[in-house]
Structures are given as structure tokens and as C-alpha cells.
Amino acid sequence: MGRTIGEVVLDLNNVSLSFGGVKALSDISFDVREHEVRAIIGPNGAGKSSMLNVINGVYRPQEGEIVLRGEHFSRMSPYKAAQSGIARTFQHIALFKGMSVLDNIMTGRTLKMKSNLVQQAFRLGPAWREELEHRAKVEEIIDFLEIQHIRKTPVGRLPYGLQKRVDLGRALAMEPQILLLDEPMAGMNVEEKQDMSRFILDVNDQLGTTIVLIEHDMGVVMDISDRVVVLDYGKKIGDGTPDEVRSNEEVISAYLGASH
Amino acid sequence: MLYRENGQFKSSYAADQQIFPIVQDRWAILGIVAFAFAAVPLLANEYLLSAILVPFLILALAALGVNLLVGYCGQITLGAGAFMAVGAYAAYNFFIRVDGMPLLAALLLGGLTAAAVGIVFGVPSLRVRGLYLAVATLAAQFLADWAFLRIKWFTNDSPSGSVSVANLHVLGWKIDSPVDRYLLCLAVLVVFALLAKNMVRSAIGRQWMAIRDMDVAAEVIGIRPMFAKLSAFAVSSFIVGVAGALWGFIHLSSWEPAAFSVDRSFQLLFMVIIGGMGSIMGSFFGAAFIVVLPIFLNQFLPWLGGLVGLAVSTATVSHAEFMIFGVLIVFFLIVEPHGLARLWSIGKEKLRLWPFPH
């Protein structure tokens, strides 16, 4: 691979999150290095999605902090996260159902579009040029994801596997430095999983995007990730390379159950 | 000519992003607009112009404004009547209090005032949604009803809250006859429809729709819900305010607060629901349906009664009108919840493939 794993870009320090009396995350710390594929695994309800929601500011942790390229945040906001180059996809598809594939991916360019409302209403030069420039960028993403044939289709009409791909496309349109993927392969067949893995590796390899990935398919996780963090009941029980995690006693017992 | 797009190749993104990418559509729309400007004033009589077409055009404009907010941004509102009232009374005050204020400027200032009020009443949308937001916007309606009846300054100290305007000019053109009124309303509607279409196919429109469809995902992409929602309220109220000012100045020419009651708000919301949420064309269909259908039934029922030898009294007609109208609304909501605009687009899809649908 042409990429080299660099410095720590994202560092989570002692993050705790609870909803009322329910502790979703307790005292979790891990880091993500530049250009790596970092997987988060764990049984259902382990707090994996909550972890992503903390990273991009949808949830506000009660304790702990997020360090993003040396900048400390005790509370991240979704807008701030987006501005800092964090994009994400969703476990349950969260596309804009009434809009076409093209428009969905175009919304990913929101932060990069600078023209104002009046310019857009009158279709003045700057707004018009900007629209065309971003259209060209979005078409590159459409080519990359091989979804040219459905660009004008409303996403609500697409099959699940393609919707997942559009979701990835919308995140890629932000040209993120860090891409959070929440179960990108859930509910897919083997072929779709292979396609998705290929897209993820290509993004990581060609664009150098750092990837934080939640996935249940252990085969995929062990294959494509550089380092894995394991959560169980909101606690971190393992962290390391796929091989280290695979042989970790605690991880094995969390997944297979311990003998008593 | 068949409705086909064979051979119409796009070789640039600019060509692909036109409002009407299909050549036939472009000609049809141009034809309709030309017909509306050139032929209708010659063909239509005074009754048709001032009792049907002018109200239709103005309410279509208001429905367009409501559709931007409800259909595109997903923020339900029951305060449209209030924003029309604000537009009308603000335009009135600018018109009579500022010497030499041109009519168009007064209309636009009325719209801007409505936009400002719309932003204020849009603030609850940042916290509540759905039915709760509907109730919060209803507050605008009651406040407007009260303010224009009780605060005498707004109505230039007229005792009943009734105000009137006369002597209207646009750039030296005296707005006097029904044809003048019709042409002015048509021109305003065409301009605003074009601006609205431009907005919904630009970044701002995508932000509104993103908030409507999935607000969490929109926020994660970097859309600020506050900006998206309040801008939708502002633009929508601006257009509704201009429509209100036209309603007062051009259609009624003397009016009182009851002209913009809560009934009006409901009427506009129904237009959007029946016409098609999230469709510019749908606003026109909805307005046509609600303005024209009662008048049509009014004429049609006595004729139908005469056909079977039954004398239908005026009272019966107006009762039947309500009932048939209600039934049709329920029918449409069940058969096509996405409104007349959806039926229209399904028809067009079918026509593209006709007569070989496979």
C-alpha cells in the first residue's frame, strides 16, 4: 500500500457518556492515527455507535475530552466536527429520501459552497459557477462509486446496498480527513460486502483518508483494519492489531462467553 | 410532436441543470406563459379576470411561499394568513406614510416586514416540530388578528381596522382595469416562481430538503439547522407577505383584518397538501383546485340538476359545494398523498414511454 500511517490525529481521553442512569460509555480512551483504518468492534449494545456519535458531536459526553489534531474539545458539535473534516455514514441509512442521488451527494458539499441566498435565487454568476464546479466534483464521486446510472433517481427508490453506497458518497463529498463508518456492510450479501470493502480501501489508499469503522463481520474487520478497539458494555476491553485482539482472552470471552 | 427526448443529448453540466431539461417542456411552458400574457387579457371577460384569475394568481403566489416552508423545509405552519396580513398592512403603511413611495417598493417592503416577523415566529421551530410547531405558528395568526384590529397605528387610525388604497401606479403604468390587475399579478407570480425554482435547485434548497428529510444527518454534514430553518421562514414569509400585499392592494383595494383570518391560513395549507408538497408546480395546481373548483361546482350543479329536471336552489348548491369539496379532498389524500403534482409527473413518465411502456 502506498500510504504510511502517521501521527495521532484523533485522541479520545477518558470519555464517559450516560443517558440518565444508563452508562453507555465509561472511561474510554483510544487514539486514531493518520491514514489508518481503525475498527471499533463489540457485541450489540456495547456503545460503538455512541462512540461515533461522541466523536462527531451528536452526543455530548459528560466526562473526558476529544483531541483533534492537537485541539482540545470537551464538547464537540456536529457543525464543528464537519468543519474540522470529520464525515460519517449511518448504521440505519439516514439519506435524504425525497432527493435524488445527485442532490444527496451535492448536500455533502454544503460547507464548501460560499454563494449566498440572493445570488442563488437570481442564479447570478458566482452561484451558477459554483454549482457547476461542485457538480463536476460530485460526478467524480459518482464515477468512483459506480452509481452513474442512478444519479437522478430518488434515493427512497433504491435497493439497500445502493443506498449504503450513496451514504458513503455523501460523506466523501465533504472531502473528509477522517471518515466514520457505522456498519457500512450491515445487511449486505458477500458480493456487496466485497464492493464496499474495496471502496473503503480505495478511499483510504488513494485519498489518504483516515477511517474509523464499526463492523460486525469479523472477516472484514480483521482483513481491512490496521488496529482494532473492542468495546463491551461501554468499557474498552481490548485494543491492538487484529492479531493481538484475536488472541485477547477478554475479547474471546465477550464474544463467545466464558466457561465457568 | 410526440413527447420524446430521443436525440436530446446533454454535453455539459450546465445543459443538464436547466429547469426544464426536456425541449418539449420548455416550449410548453413558454407557450403557456405567452398565452397568459398575450391572449388571456383579450379573451377573458371582466368577471373571469377579477373574480377568478386574479385571486388564483395571488393565492398561487402565497401557496408557493407556504410550499417552500412546509413542502421543502418540512416546517408546518398555520400562520400564513398572519404573514399575508403583515405584508398587506406593512405595505399599506409604507405606501401612505412615505411620500412618493412607489407601489412595487411598498409591496417589497411589505414582504420584507413579513420576512422579519416570519423569522421571529420561526424561532420555535428550532425546538419543536410537527403539530407542536403548527400550534406555535398559530400564535402568529391570533397575534396578527388582534394587532391589526386593536393597534390603531397600523390601520392609520381607522375605527374598524378597514383601510383602502387608490391611485396605483407601477413605473408610470396606471393599475386600473381588471386587465392591468391581472397582468401585474401574473408578472409578479412569474418572477417569484422563477426565483423560488432557482432557490430550490441550489444549495439553499438542498439544505431545506435535507433538514426536512433527516435533520441529524444534515447537521453532521455541516448544515446549520438554525440557518436553514430561519431562512426558510424568512423566504416563505417574504413571498407570502408580498402575496398578502397584492391581495389587499390589487384584489380587494380596501380590506379589513378579517381578510387574513385563520381560514386563509388553512386554505393555503390545503392548497399545498392537495397540490403537492415540495413542488413549485404543485402550488399552482393546489391554488387552481381550491379557487376554481367551488366556482365550477357553483355553475355545474344547477346545470346537472336541470338535466334531470331538478331545480337546485342556491342554498343547496352551497351546501353541496362544501360536501363535494370535502369528499374530493379526502379522496385525493387517500389516492395520491403526494398531491396533484405527483399525478402530473406520473402522467408525464407514462407519456414518455407511450405507446410502448416496456
Image: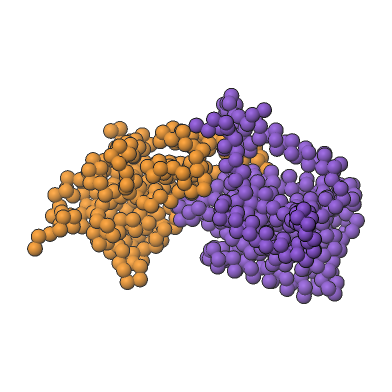
Tell me the residue at 23%/59% (across/down).
A232
Quarter of the image with the N terminus of chain A is top left
Seen from the viewer's position, the closer of residues A181 and B268 is B268
Residue A61 in the figure: left or right of residue A242? right
* Frontmost residue, B330 versus A31: B330
Q: In the shown orientation, is residue B131 left or right of residue B31?
A: left
Q: Position of residue B5 (x, y in %)?
A: 59, 29
Viewed as shown, does residue B292 lie left or right of A31? right
Q: Is residue B146 above or below residue A194?
A: below
Q: Is residue B113 visible?
A: no
Residue B161, by quadrant, is: bottom right
List x then y, in percent, for residue B256: 80, 67
Q: Is residue B132 visible?
A: yes
Q: Determine the image quadrant of residue B252.
A: bottom right
Tell me residue A193's x, y (percent): 30, 40
**Which chain did the image draw in purple?**
B
Q: Residue furthest left?
A: A260
- Chain A palette colour: orange
Direction front: furthest residue: B309
Q: Could you tell me which residue is drawn at 75 percent across and 55 percent down?
A: B308
Going by the picture, which residue comes out furthest to the top?
Answer: B7
Number of marks: 0
Residue visible at 68% across and 59% down? Answer: B325
Q: Nearer the viewer, residue B219 or B44?
A: B44
Query: B233 above or below A150?
Result: below
Figure quadrant of the C terminus of chain A: bottom left
Residue B334, image quadrant: bottom right
Q: Residue at x 78, y 66 (%)?
A: B315
**Residue A43: x and y, percent?**
24, 56
Picture colour scheme: by chain
Q: Nearer the viewer, residue A237 or A260?
A: A260
